[in-house]
Amino acid sequence: MNSRLFTFIGGDIGPWRVIKTVAIQGESLPPTNRVEIIAGPVDPAGLSAAWILRGITSNERYVTRDEKDRLVARQQALGRPEATCAALIPIRKNSDWWALTQDERRNIFEEQSKHIKIGLEYLPAVGRRLHHCRDLAPDEPFDFITLFDYAPAQEADFDNLLAELRACEEWKYVEREVELRLSREEV
Amino acid sequence: MNSRLFTFIGGDIGPWRVIKTVAIQGESLPPTNRVEIIAGPVDPAGLSAAWILRGITSNERYVTRDEKDRLVARQQALGRPEATCAALIPIRKNSDWWALTQDERRNIFEEQSKHIKIGLEYLPAVGRRLHHCRDLAPDEPFDFITLFDYAPAQEADFDNLLAELRACEEWKYVEREVELRLSREEV
């Protein structure tokens, strides 16, 4: 069975070497050498990890059919052989965001911030998987975890994608954001 | 701290006596005498229960600001002294529903099914709290649990509310629904 739940483990094992761990907004995560990503839950007992995060893939919350069709036509699954660079970006939005109604959130997300339009410009070079955390439990440290991957030659483009998103109206509601850059190095 | 997570325990204890347990669509739940509702998580070890369900309150997924303002002006919190009748209704929607985009789901939910408009007609007589389950874990048995309460004199109105909702387009996507009617009898 394909699990919708993924576990992200920061420690000393796993195929992803951590290039940097940066607090973009709010509190950082403890820096680690490696990240392991597991499809499914993990029993934390006996694990030596600096941090463990988890998220679940779910139905999309904002895209329209027209946008979805354009995304599906261009987007790539994670794990292409050339995609040896990755970014793991956990984010928490503030309570003002979550108090907005669906039409207000959609308006900020796309009509003001062009989140989908910006993302489309970077497809198919950047692979992406969004994991939701907010409704896993009432005390999750983040609302979302996004995992991106791309080839080394696309790094400058990926930097531009992040800069564009962080400059938009939607990001004014982000109260915590940590950026990990990863490099795939099987050991 | 107010927990967004609630645990629903079907067994022999708790203030809610079970009047009936009915499978409306798909598999039922084992019938029990009592239901207990806990704000927060529960350790199932040592609990003698026929079933344990859980759900988490979350941001609204469909209402617009205008609809929200009308709901807030009329809706009541659960637990009014006269509201000694309750209904606990867990629901699971099918994969077709979850594959729809946001605009398609909203269109079915309100423009076709009038879910919010119908609900508004029964306020403030019926109290309601919606709990989300689908993103708690990949293997939850239901997507939503709704808890309603009302005074005994409102029972026929409440029956009408359920009949109206079950006749609408949105309900064609419901693949499992169990209805428990409860009566508050402190012991």
Image (tube, coloured by chain):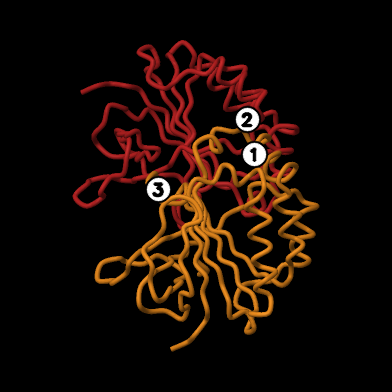
Chain colours: A red, B orange
User: Can you tell which mark lies on residue B184?
Assistant: none
**Relative height, residue A132 to residue A182 (above, below):** below
Residue where numbered disc 1 is placed: B105
The three-letter code of the residue at mark 2 reads Leu
State the residue position of label 3: B137
| Disc 2 target residue | A165
- Label pair 3/1, CB-CB below 8 angstroms: no
Residue B122 at what x, y percent from top left?
73, 65
Q: Residues within 10 Å of mark 1 (few under 14, many from 20)?
A: many
- Residue type for callout 3: Ala
How packed mark 3 is, by other alpha carbons closer than 10 Å (few <14, some 14-19, many 20 or more), is some
Tell me: B104 left or right of A76.
Answer: right
Residue A173 picture location, percent across and down: 64, 45
What residue is at 32 percent from the left and 69 percent from the top? B49
Q: Is residue A88 toward the left or the right of residue B2 in the image?
A: left
**Left or right of residue A101: residue A134:** left
